[in-house]
Image (cartoon, helix red, strand yellow):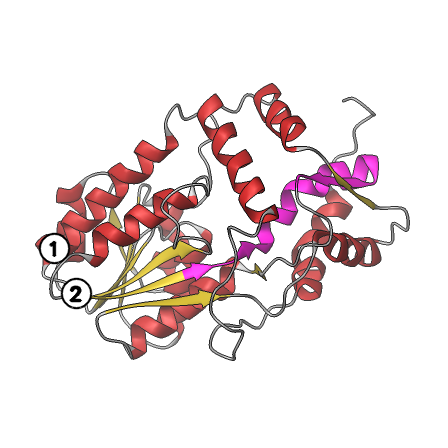
Amino acid sequence: MFVITGASGRTGRAAAEHLLAAGHPVRAVGRSARRLAGLAARGAEVCEADPADPGALTDAFRGADGIYAVIQPNYLPDHPDFGAFQDRVAASLTEAVAGSGATRVVGLSSWGAQHAVGTGPVSGLHRFEQRLSAVPGVDTLWLRAGYFMENLLDHIGTAQTHHRISAPFDPGIPLPFVSTRDVGSRAGELLATGAWRGTEILELQGERDVSMREAVRVIAEAVGVDDLAYERISLADFHAGLRDAGVSAGVADMMTEAGEAINSRRIRMQQPRTARTSTPTSVEQFVADACAPRFRTAPRTTEGG
């Protein structure tokens, strides 16, 4: 039995689907059984549990041959202290692993998690790694995933309406774009094979490094907008825009710090690109499958609307 936390999220769902397709029993854990109905229909056992409830998680983890441990990777925009939220869930997951007797865990982390500070929310994943890796008798493999391709979906509205994509990243800096489906599928594959001992780290770097300039060019070609442009905005303007959009001061600070860390290469991959650290989905394929259809159906707004 393999237990998947965050099973209604992108990587968790992909991990569960990979294991189910291979014939493995899966216990899918999430806050809402309703959101796990699709996995239940495919044969998964569904367990409703809050990730900050160590008692519920301990029960969910008992009897597991392996666990996929996930702290919600996307920001909670209005959270007053997202770092404290990360620490609370990390403590809950760690307590549950220790209390359940589980001996094998694949944990979702991020590129740059080797640093304790200066990386925005990635610092919370560094603390998660340190905490869970200290549990005795547990073989833990950390997947340090690169820059999620799904972040491109956040730009579709302005790409359609204003023919530009704005972000605080240096337009030419290489980013290890990786799809969440590839990350989840690899997590499921690794749980099934269990070919590691002790604590190990595996960076998942995507099919190849792609700059924001190149990513925008790929989107432009896919949707047929010749004048789609990449606009680099300052970190100060990025922060101000987040605050104007209702993002809490703490979360805006974290997101801005992450942008600076990527530009300065503080957040960067350490392991060489190999067949093991690479994943199959290219930016071109992701854009064709996910960005282009959304671009064509996104509601049009007027300038300033």
Magenta span contains residue 159: yes
Which kind of residue does numbered mark 2 sit on? Val
Tell me what residue is drawn at x 48 percent, y 22 percent: 249
Image spot of residue 63 (x, y percent): 13, 64
What residue is drawn where x is 37% and y is 56%? 108
Which element is circle 1 on? Answer: helix
**Residue at (14%, 57%) from the top-left corner?**
135
State whether residue 51 appears in this view: no
Horizontal relation, residue 79 to residue 85: left or right: right
Residue tagged 2: 138
Extreme right residue here? Answer: 226
Tell me the kind of residue under disc 1: Ala
Disc on res. 98: 1
Q: Which residues are magenta?
A: 144-168
Separation (CA) of disc 1 from disc 2 = 8 Å
The N terminus - image quarter: bottom left
Q: Quadrant of the C terminus?
A: top right
Could you tell me if the residues under marks 1 and 2 are in contact, i.e. CB atoms within 8 Å? yes
User: Is label 2 in a helix, a strand or a loop?
Assistant: loop
Residue 92 falls left or right of residue 185? left
Q: Is residue 244 above or below residue 11?
A: above
Circle 2 crowding by C-alpha within 10 Å: few under 14, some 14–19, many from 20: some
